[in-house]
Image: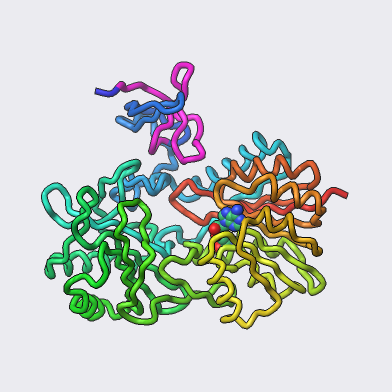
Amino acid sequence: MNKIVKGKCIDISSEGKGVVKYQKDIIFCDGLFIGEEADIEILYQRAGVYFGKVRKLHTISKDRIQPKCKICTSCGGCQYQQINYQKQLEYKTNRVKNAIKRIAKIDTKVNDCIGMKDPYHYRNKIQVPFAKDRKGNVVYGFYKENSHEIIPTKECMIEDKRAASILWDIKELIKKMGIPTYNEDNGRGILRYVLIRTSYHYNELMVVLVTSMLNFPGQRNFVDALIKLHPEITSIVENVNSRHTNVILGNKEKILYGPGFIKDDILGLTFEISPSSFFQVNPEQVEVLYKTALDLIDINKEQVVLDAYSGVGTIGLIASKNAKRVISVEIVKDAHKNAIENAKRNNISNIEFHCGDAGEFINSYDGDLDIVIMDPPRKGSDEKFLSTLINKKVPQIIYISCDPETLARDLEYLKQSYDVTYIQPVDMFPMTAHCETIVALSIKK
Ligand code: SAH
């Protein structure tokens, strides 16, 4: 029996857990929000911090709502389903404010986080494992937090609505056709994951079947039956992953139906999305994000822009319309290749693409740079990149970040030479604790 203690939530951690003071220690408690008091079951301790879950709520926040998702307390994907959207945005704004004050130690105003009109069913990429439960029933859904136990999920509240019935029918079809799900323990079986990617601007939808072997028996009949049930599917791809690994996609691919990719638009440009392409998962908010970022700078035809950590080139391609020239740098080869194709598809020629580390690239680049737009992964940028910005006296920087704490760390470094002029959080991931932020910096005069 775990220990149960009484406590009051005084803050929200960067992972979206309620922060509770317990004697001289801290408990991070799932599903507990500011002002609420509860009996908390202590589950485990890690790095000097306790982790717990609510056993009984005593004081309930007025912002608590009935979650739309029935499994949100066990799935671990969403931290904020139980709190109203306005409050979620407030938590995100405060997270950025705290990081800026505590870590960056600057006093630039943080604007209120920009939310979505309808914060549900926004995700354009859905990936779920398939397996058998203890009773031998085929199940699919999400892994319980920190485990490989599948929580069966009939409908996920943040995913594109079109996915739910397709996943259900895939389950029914494999049962009927005797296509076995993969068993992680002994490596037997076939179907491992199903990935669905949907287009926001076009009637296009791709199903990727991640299997343990190429050309699984009954494949043709399965594809025909699925298309008959769901004519909205425009591509089906088999991706083979025979390795014993947590990575979802393998390297081998076979197109079973349609062109093998879908396309989607961002701010008027068209991008091709293949099974493994990186593409922003919230198609409505990505336009808000990019537009807000680009509105903070006046790019003109005399200027050279660097798009660092560029992914498939989206931001740089959009910025290229107003710039003299754009230079993009991205470390992942496939994304780099996609970026080159994306430029061709949109007939854009004033952009060049480099594949490699952003810090090394900028360090070795000896031309002029007027504006740097940087969008690093969660771990943030590094000293090589940041010190080169300072040495080269790049006049303007737009920093787009998906982690307020690493962003603040990098701003703390940049502030020796830059003024932070604008800070704008944007909600790309409603219902979760993730928070995107745009920051504008200009070199000190
Ligand atoms: N700007 C893009 C992608 C942002 S995600 C968009 O908005 O869609 C961050 C990107 O940085 C990823 O594509 C990742 O592969 C890339 N990346 C990570 N480390 C890098 C490094 N050291 N140098 C260059 N790119 C890097």
* Ligand 1 positioned in quadrant: bottom right
Range shown magenta? 3-32
Q: Out of 388 and 143, give the one closest to the viewer.
A: 388
Q: Is residue 398 left or right of residue 93?
A: right
Residue 367 in the image, given as x and y percentages of width and height: 80, 64
Residue 100 in the image, given as x and y percentages of width and height: 66, 40
Q: Is residue 213 left or right of residue 98?
A: left
Residue under the image location 79 percent in, 69 percent down: 303
Give the image quarter of residue 223. Answer: bottom left
Q: Out of 422 and 45, give the one closest to the viewer.
A: 45
Residue 292 in the image, given as x and y percentages of width and height: 65, 62
Residue under the image location 76 percent in, 43 percent down: 415
389 relative to 210, above or below: above
Residue 21 within the segment the image draws in magenta: yes
Quarter containing the N terminus? top left
Residue under the image location 36 percent in, 71 percent down: 253
Residue lying at the far right in this picture: please name it: 445
Can residue 114 be seen by looking at this rendering? no
123 relative to 184, above or below: below
47 relative to 375, above or below: above
Residue 20 within the segment the image draws in magenta: yes
Count of marks, rendered view? 0
Query: Colour mode?
Result: rainbow
Q: Out of 233 and 40, give the one closest to the viewer.
A: 233
Q: Main secondary structure of the magenta part?
A: strand
